[in-house]
Amino acid sequence: MADKLVEELKQLVSDITEVPVEELDTDADFFKDLNIDSLKAIEIVAAFEKKYRVIIPEQDIPKIRNIRKIIEYTKSIKKTGA
């Protein structure tokens, strides 16, 4: 399941940013490493929320800076049942 989630998230980020999936590292910072602007970052969060039917509180959005953070956030949602 974890590998499938990683691949799905990489594809989602790739579709929005046009960065090839094979160039996406789970720890690559959206802003520093991938040169993603804030609007693209918001698109990533919105697509994630839509795909997985979750709502990320506004105060948590700045913490999501790479694919690993999205995965960690997803796991924390599943643990709390939110």
Image (cartoon, grey):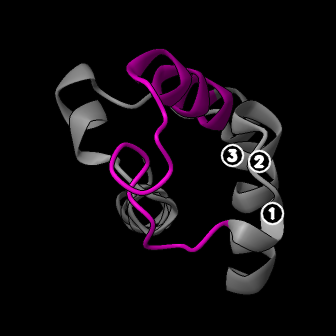
Look at the image and tell me whether residue 5 can be seen.
no
Answer with the quarter of the image where residue 16 lies.
top right
With 15 as the anchor, is 29 left or right in this view?
left
**Residue tagged 1:** 21
Left-right relation of 39 to 6 = left
Q: Position of residue 31 (x, y in %)?
A: 36, 43
In the rendered view, would you say 27 is above or below 9? below
Secondary element type, mark 2: helix
What's the distance in space between the residues labelled 2 and 3, CA to CA?
4 Å
The structure residue drawn at horizontal position 35% and vertical position 50%, both measured from the top left corner, is: 65
The structure residue drawn at horizontal position 74% and vertical position 84%, both measured from the top left corner, is: 3
**Amino acid type indicated by mark 3:** Val
The residue under label 1 is which amino acid type?
Val
Q: Is residue 39 above or below residue 31?
A: above
Q: Residue 36 or 56: which is nearer the viewer?
A: 36
Give the SS element for disc 3.
helix
> What residue lies at 72% left-to-right and 60% top-to-bottom?
10
Label number found at residue 38: none
Of the image marks 1 and 3, the number of the one nearer the N terminus: 3
Dot 1: what SS? helix
Residue 46 in view here: yes
In contact (CB < 8 Å): disc 2 and disc 3: yes
Say which of 65 and 54 sits in front.
65
Residue 73 is situated, as x and y percent measured from the top left of the image, at: 39, 57
Amino acid type, callout 2? Ser
Name the residue carrying label 3.
Answer: 13
Numbered tag placed on residue 14 in the rendering: 2
Instruction: Determine contact: label 2, label 1, CB under 8 Å.
Output: yes
Separation of marks 1 and 3 at Cα, in angstroms: 8 Å
The image quadrant where one finds the C terminus is top left
